[in-house]
Amino acid sequence: MTPNTPSSKKNSSQASNSTKKYKVLAIDIGGTNVKLLASGQKEMRKVPSGPTLTAREMVSKVKAAVNDWPYDAISIGYPGPVVQGRPISEPFNLAPGWVKFDFRKAFSKPVKIINDAAMQAIGSYKKGRMLFLGLGTGLGSAMIVDGVLQPMELAHLPYKKGRTYEDYLGKRGLERLGHKKWQKNVFEAVAQLRQAVQADDVVLGGGNAKKLTDLPAGVRLGGNNNAFIGGFRMWQDETVRHGIVRTAGSK
């Protein structure tokens, strides 16, 4: 089975039409880039990320990148655990200084923050028990069961040979193992985690998901633009709040 990846333009357009009530700026913070899309816009924009990026610098770069876009609310997909709408630990692949940063004050807009994988999961969800894994610089993870989202932190759990899941499935694993062995480990980890959580649907997102040349049965690709759909849903549906939330796909 060969993955069928929709074009970035099509996905961006679909994402931008998924909210009506607010003009929302969705910010997907990754270890390589910070990706941006606002309600009504057709093309994603991005600014460089990396191990020296601070929260204050991120805000400054984002404001400059979208200064011609109108928006009145912000959703942030944060690369780390979030509780009650606030990051509780510093991001593994970025500079420190995020946990106590006041994003609402810095942007002068209402802000909702959620784990980045959880934001993608909200945009990817259809029904049932879905496991989401984000294959990017690191490894994101989230689970949605019958519309109820529970963010997860699988990345730094032990996997094998004294290394973590992220060491094998993230960017470092791809570079260390090469594509063939990396993909083999992705498939093995998916099978293991799917069995552990009894998922009937598995979605692989993140920037490196498109590098997979095949997909196991019952696994589908969820492009990075699903993070924007999730970010828009966070303001479109008032039941989508912090931590455990009910998604737009629930009954």
Image (spheres, rainbow, N blue to C red):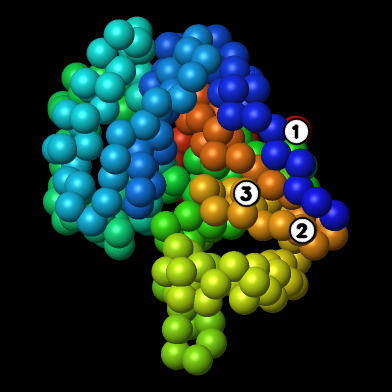
Residue at horizontal 62 percent and vertical 49 percent from the top: 210
Q: Which residue is mark 2?
A: 215
Residue type pointed to by label 3: Lys
Instruction: Tell me what residue is drawn at x 50 percent, y 91 percent.
Output: 161
The label on residue 251 is: 1
Q: Mark 3 sits on what residue?
A: 210
Query: Which quarter of the rendering shows the N terminus?
Result: bottom right
The residue at 46%/35% (across/down) is: 241
What secondary structure is marked by label 2? loop
Distance from label 1 to label 2 (Cα)? 29 Å
Note whether residue 233 is visible.
Answer: no
Residue count near mark 2 (Cα–Cα under 10 Å), binned few <14, some 14–19, many ≥20: some
| Image quarter of residue 9 | top right
Report helix, strand or loop for mark 3. Answer: helix
Estimate the x, y position of residue 204 in percent, counting from the top left.
64, 53
Amino acid carrying mark 2 in the image:
Leu
